[in-house]
Amino acid sequence: MKPLRMARDVMLHPLEFFYDIQFVGRSKVVAAIALVLLTVAVRVLSLTITGFSYQTREPYQISVVLQAVWIIVPWLTWAVANWGVSTIVDGEGKFVDVLSGSAFAFIPYVVFMLPIAVLTNVLSLSESMIVSGLTAAVYLWVVMLVLMKVKVVHDFELGKVVWISLLTIAGMFVVWFIGLLVFGLVNQAFSFVIGLYKELSFRW
């Protein structure tokens, strides 16, 4: 499936698109990773070219690594948590379909955020409602695509989609908490080993 055709289908026929990608080959994983990286690039570029009146930070304060973390970490943890929670309640989706489907939900962001950033260069702050409305519409579109993905990939009813999505968000916080806990323990163990090595080196 061609990238442009994927973008068109996910925006115009999302239910059919999320159903069809379950039968597409390994290329969907490559396309999904490329799409997430493209989302990071669009995020950084849109922050950079946003009009002066709408800037909330200086260009040198924009960190590519930080912006990548803000996008990639939620994407990965959503996929892990959603797949785990859905598996417990008889969801039919495979992890690779959850992962790639979640990435394709970024397409409205990739398509529209740069034009919105350009628009901030010609609109005054008194017209910020237009920018805020368009930005909110894009984010809402992304959320709706994520919910549609959950429904189609796992074959859930609407009520179950909402319930599973809330559980998935809770699961994401659990994953982040465990990740921070493991990071803290590893960091302490590493510091202990370094300190022990310095102590032994000093004595011997």
Image (cartoon, grey):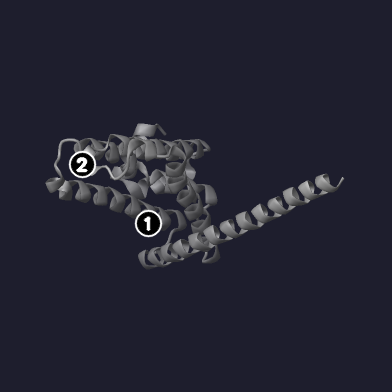
Residue 96 placed where, x, y %? 52, 47
Residue 80 located left or right of residue 14: right
Q: Residue at x 73, y 48 (%)?
A: 194
Up the image or down, 110 lies above or below 168; here it is above
Considering depth in this image, is 159 or 73 the residue closer to the camera?
73
**Pointer 2: what residue?**
53
For the residues bearing labels 1 and 2, Cβ distance under 8 angstroms: no
Mark 2 residue type: Ser
Residue type, numbered disc 1: Leu
Which quadrant of the rendered structure holds the N terminus? top left
Can you say which quadrant of the picture contains the C terminus? top right
The local crowd at label 2, few if under 14, some if 14 to 19, many if 20 or more residues have their Cα within 10 Å, is: few
Q: Nearer the viewer, residue 90 or 98?
A: 98
Distance from Cα at disc 1 to Cα at disc 2: 34 Å
Q: Tell me residue 4's x, y (percent).
A: 35, 33
* Viewer-proximal residue among 24 and 59: 59
Quickly name the residue at label 1: 147
> Which residue occupies 61% across, 54% down?
183
- SS at badge 1: helix
N-terminal label among 1 and 2: 2
Whether 27 is drawn above or below 192: the answer is above
| Quarter of the figure with residue 21 | top left
